[in-house]
Image (tube, grey):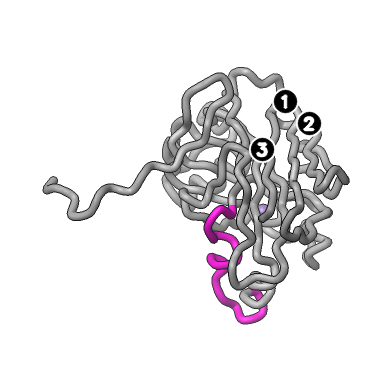
Amino acid sequence: MSAFVIPAPAIAAVPVAGGGSFPVRRIFCVGRNYAAHAREMGHDPDREAPFFFCKPSDSILTGGRDMPYPTMCNDLHHEMELVVALGSGGCDIAEADALAKVWGYAAGLDMTRRDLQNEAKKAGRPWDMAKGFDCSAPIGELVPAAALADPTKGKIELKVNGVVRQTSDLSTLIWSIAETISYLSRLVRLEAGDLIFSGTPEGVAAVKRGDLMEGFVEHVGTVTARVV
Ligand code: MN
C-alpha cells in the first residue's frame, strides 16, 4: 500500500482492568432490549426482532473523564448498559458458540440526544446524530470474560448525583447476549474489536451540566462521567 496522505487516525481503545487496553473497531447498540424500557418509549416489547444502530468507535469516553454537554441538544438522556467486547467474530454465529467470541464486558452509557431522536423518529430519519455524537459512549474498564462468574445475570444500576435512576437485572434482557451476537452476525460479519451496547433498562431520563453519572454492573464494574 502507498503511504497515507495524512497521519493515520488514532485507534480508539478501552482500558482493561489489571492493565492493557482493548482496541475498538466498531460500536453496535441494541435498541429496546428490556421490556419495561420498550414500554416507557411507547412500544410493545413482545412484537419486535432486535434492531441495531451504531456509534463511531471514537465516540467512547474513558477514564471517568467529563462528558461535554452536546451541541444542538436540550434533552440529553442517560441509558445505562452492559457492553460486550468481542475478541473474535464471524458470520452466522450459532447462539451456542456466541459467548466464546466475547473477550470481556464493561459498564457503559449510551448517551442520547433525545430531542433529536424524537424528531428523527417522527420524520423517519436516521438516528446517527441523536446517538453517535462526540463523547456519546462513556465506558468503564473492561473485565475479561474469563474472570466473570455469570455475565447473564446481575444487577445493573445508574445513579445520578447519588440518586438511583435506573435499576434492573441482566436476566431481564429480552435478547440475551448470545442471541444478540448471533442475530447481529447474520446482518454483518462481526470482528475482533467490535463493541456491543446491549440495551438499557427502564428509567431513562435527562441529565444537565454538573450532574454526576455513576453506573454499576454487578460482576463487571463501574462507569463514571460528569456532564459539563
Ligand atoms: Mn441504548
Query: For the view shown, which residue lies furthest in the bottom direction?
Result: 123
Q: Is residue 28 magenta?
A: no
State the SS at label 2. loop
Q: Is residue 103 left or right of residue 121?
A: left
Residue 123, x across and y down, in percent? 62, 81
Q: Quadrant of residue 175?
A: top right
Which comes sooner in the sequence, label 3 or label 2? 3
How packed is label 1: few (under 14 Cα within 10 Å), some, or many (20 or more)? some
Residue placed at 77% from the left, 61% from the top?
206
| Residue 86 falls left or right of residue 145 | left
Residue sitting at x 38%, y 42%: 11
Amino acid at circle 3: Ala
Q: Is residue 198 above or below residue 117?
A: above
Q: Which mark is residue 210?
A: none
Q: Are marks 3 and 2 in contact (CB under 8 Å)?
A: no
Separation of disc 3 and disc 1 at Cα?
10 Å
Q: Disc 3, disc 1: CB below 8 Å?
A: no
Q: Position of residue 143 (x, y in %)?
A: 60, 26
Q: Earlier in the sequence, mark 2 or mark 1?
A: 2
Query: Which residue, given by chain and number where applicable, does mark 3 sit on?
Result: 107
**Could you say which disc has been placed on residue 219 in the image?**
1
Q: Amino acid at mark 1?
A: His
